[in-house]
Image (spheres, helix red, strand yellow):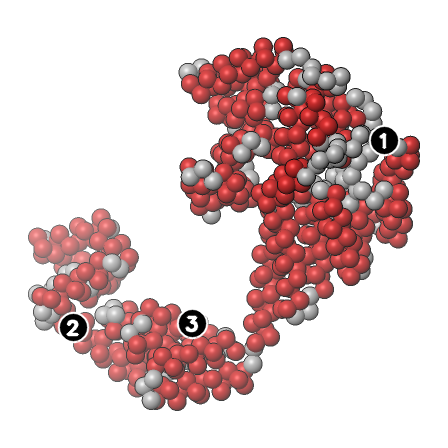
Amino acid sequence: MSEEAKSRGNAAFSAGDYAAAVEHFTDAIALSPTNHVLYSNRSAAHASLHHYADALEDAKKTVELKPEWSKGYSRLGAANLGLHQIQEAISAYKKGLEIDPNNEGLKSGLADAQAAAPRSRDAPPLSPFGNAFSGPEMWAKLTADPETRMYLQQPDFVKMMQEMQKNPNNLNLYLKDQRVMRAFGVLLNVKFGGPNSGDDMEIPEETSTPQSSASERKEDKKMEEKVVEPEPMKVTEEAKGTKPQAVKEKELGNAAYKKKEFEKAIEHYTKAMELDDEDISYLTNRAAVYLETGKYDECIKDCDKAVERGRELRSDFKMVARALTRKGTAFVKMAKCSRDYEPAIEAFQKALTEHRNPDTLKRLNEAEKAKKDLEQQEYFDPSLAEEEREKGNEFFKQQKYPEAVKHYSESLRRNPKDPKAYSNRAACYTKLGALPEGLKDAEMCIELDPTFSKGYTRKGAVQFFMKEYDKALETYQEGLKHDPQNQDLLDGVRRCVGQLNKASRGDLSPEELKERQAKGMQDPEIQNILSDPVMRQVLVDFQENPKAAQEHTKNPSVMSKIQKLVQAGIVQMK
């Protein structure tokens, strides 16, 4: 499965559809999380989209999984170079060349990084705050701070920071973005809060990593273009005072949650929301408590508020996806019938458009399966199934086989454990010449009731029409063990023996012999017999060494295999 997703990703990458390639590689990683090639490929796709923070994360994972693989360092260098982390890029390329000194890609990348180094050092600041955005120190500071580290995994934020690195005067364009204000405070060592720091409390049903959807990136771009009159960056005394208090309340709530003091946790999260309404993690955390305590309606309300508020604040996609996933989980907990799963499935699907998380995908698949299983249970009605089967019987008597199949199929939907309906539909398929379908139904009939003789007559008839006379004979004989006097089974045995004796006597026409030999050569059992070195020697002895052949006839196992070859028309006895 992971190879199929990888192939689709490679195809999308070759076609220039890098966003689709990322999705396919992500699916492949979910199925094979230790495959270093998949992370390398996704890093390349991210880099092609200029999402260098994501590319760097995947490149690091590639090197972690396969440190002796030179291509991982090529990905690492390219991602660092895209983020203008020149020294890190140079170091990565050099490390790769230590492993593979002749790698042209690494040599070329190193040359590009070394050429970019002087430009990076000589670029003068263009504003009083230019030094704050210069060099790799900016990225190091943002990475070191837990409140801004997560922003580096958001492509639109990385792009804004890159623009400000090129021209610090661009700061005025992005002052309305609270993430930029937060980052600016970190770079100037002025610590102040901002919405959605992202350290949401983890509970068992959610595990995810940040990743933005293409639709949301487009939306971010539209919103950035609407900024006409940037507001001056201000940090009010009130904000300085309430946001730290809110964070403190959240920490107290997390501690209470871990101790299973759920009422206290709700009180602290509620207080945090009152102090700071620009961080949706307080809502999602309180929703987690409601989910844990079985207050599903309250959980759903908090999740809806978190999604609505998160869109207003342009929160991290991961946070919005988490709220939607939590909402879907609440609906699953409340589900009592198949229809109850529909809002859960919708919530999981919306969450995946925000952030493609393997855990959310797993929950979606489980909800869809549970819905399907419940639908089958709700549809189950043996009395209606019997009515449909009788209708099918009427159409069968009238030789209206397609109509009969329709009613037998409806009967099986109403009662999928009825061997008679499978037997009847197998007969219809046989009349229609749909032999593989007829064989499948006959086998299901026998599986459901091994003592039901009709199942064996249906299966034997299909095999006979497929000219698999030896298999048909075995089927009829197996049926006679359960019903020794069954006339249909006895007639089936006689027909099969007659056909097999024709082959033994050499009475087959050239066309019949050729057809039977071709069918026999497709039989895995015949193939195994012919590929057995011992049996090949036995066949040679029958042709060239009568004394040895006489000895072989005393071996029941050998003669059973010889008989199989005779019945298949491969060997003729004279």
Relative depth, front residue between 340 and 562: 340
In percent of the image, x 26 and y 60: which residue is there?
A: 523
Residue 185: where, in percent of width, then height?
A: 79, 26
Which quarter of the rendering shows the C terminus?
bottom left
Quadrant of the image occupied by residue 212: top right
Q: Residues within 10 Å of mark 1 (few under 14, many from 20)?
A: some
Q: Earlier in the sequence, mark 3 or mark 2?
A: 3
Q: Residues within 10 Å of mark 3 (few under 14, many from 20)?
A: many
Relative depth, front residue between 553 and 493: 493
Residue 153: where, in percent of width, then height?
A: 65, 34
Residue 172: where, in percent of width, then height?
A: 73, 28
Relative depth, front residue between 418 and 334: 334
Q: Is 281 placed left or right of 572 in the picture?
A: right
The disc label shown at residue 235, or none: 1
Q: Is 59 placed left or right of 324 in the picture?
A: left
Q: Earlier in the sequence, mark 1 or mark 3?
A: 1
In the picture of the structure, the residue carrying the numbered disc 3 is: 444
Q: Amino acid at mark 3?
A: Met
In the picture of the structure, the residue carrying the numbered disc 2 is: 501
- Which of label 3 and label 2 is nearer to you? 3
Work out how far the residue at label 1 is from the one at label 3, CA to CA, in angstroms.
Answer: 73 Å
In percent of the image, x 83 and y 47: which residue is there?
A: 257
Work out how far the residue at label 2 is from the one at label 1, CA to CA, in angstroms.
Answer: 98 Å
